[in-house]
Amino acid sequence: MIVLKDVAKRYRSDAGTSKWVLTNVTLTIPRRCSVGLVGRNGAGKSTLLRLIGGIDQPTRGSVERRCRVSWPLGFGGGLQGSLTGRQNVKFVCRLHGFDEHLSEQMAFVQTFSELGDAFDEPIKTYSSGMSARLKFALSLVFDFEVYLVDELTAVGDAAFKKKSRAAFQELADHAGLIMVSHDERSLKEFCSAGIWLHEGRAHWFDNIDEALACYKDSISA
C-alpha cells in the first residue's frame, strides 16, 4: 500500500518560486492495484511518479510506502554516468542485497537490454533509449511489489517493444503497476484503475476508462 497525505510540490526557478505542480494530493493506492496516471502535459504525472518512487521529495505532505516500490522505469536519472552499465548493475544489485547470483543477474540484464558491448561502456555515452532499456532490464531482477512506469513501452524498436509488453504483462500478473503513458491502448491493457491529474489535484477512479473520459473532456473543453 502507498499512502499520500496532503502532498504538494513546486519547483524553484531562476526567476523565483514557480507555481504549484501538485496541491493537497491525498491518495491510498492498494498494493496489487494497476493504476494509470493521466492528464495534460505538465499536469504533474511524472512528478507524482517520482514522489511515489522516492526520487524526489514533496514540498509539503508525506508519502508512505508500505511495500517494495521500484524506481520509475523510463526515468532518465538514477544511474552513475561515469560507471559502465555492468558496474551500475553490480552496484545496484549489491545495494539491494543481491550478491548471491550476481553473475547470472548481470548476464540477464545485458541480454535483455540488448546493449551488447555497450554494457561495458560508461552510461554517459548511452542514448536515452539505451539507458531506459538498461533500467528496465535491471528492474526485472528484483521482486518489487509495485512497479512505476514512465512511458517505457515507447523505448526501442518493434521487437524490443514486443518483448517489453510481454514482460509488463508478467509484472501485471503478480505485482501492482503505476503507469504514465500517452498510449491509451497501453493504459487499458495494463491498468484497471486510474488517477486523473488536473489543475494540481488528483482524482481517483476505480475504472481506467472513467479517468480517461475525464481527461479527454478536459482537453476538448
Image (spheres, rainbow, N blue to C red):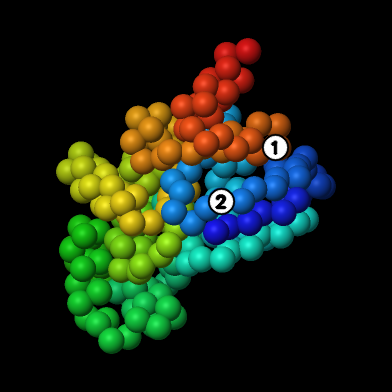
Give 106 or 30, whichever is nearer the viewer: 30
Pointer 1: what residue?
201
Question: Element at badge 2?
Answer: strand
Which residue lies at the image location 21% right of the left edge and 68% below the top edge?
Answer: 108
Amino acid residing under circle 1: Arg
Which residue lies at the image location 29% right of the left edge and 74% below the top edge?
Answer: 86
Mark sitting on residue 131 = none
**Above-or-below relation of 173 to 218:** below
Residue 220 at x, y = what percent?
Answer: 57, 14
For residue 115, which quarter of the picture? bottom left
Amino acid residing under circle 2: Ile
Crowding around mark 1 (Cα neighbors within 10 Å: few <14, some 14 to 19, many 20+) is some
Give 131 or 175, whichever is nearer the viewer: 175
Crowding around mark 2 (Cα neighbors within 10 Å: few <14, some 14 to 19, many 20+) is some
Residue 45 at x, y = what percent?
Answer: 57, 42
**Above-or-below relation of 4 to 199:** below
**Above-or-below relation of 90 to 207:** below
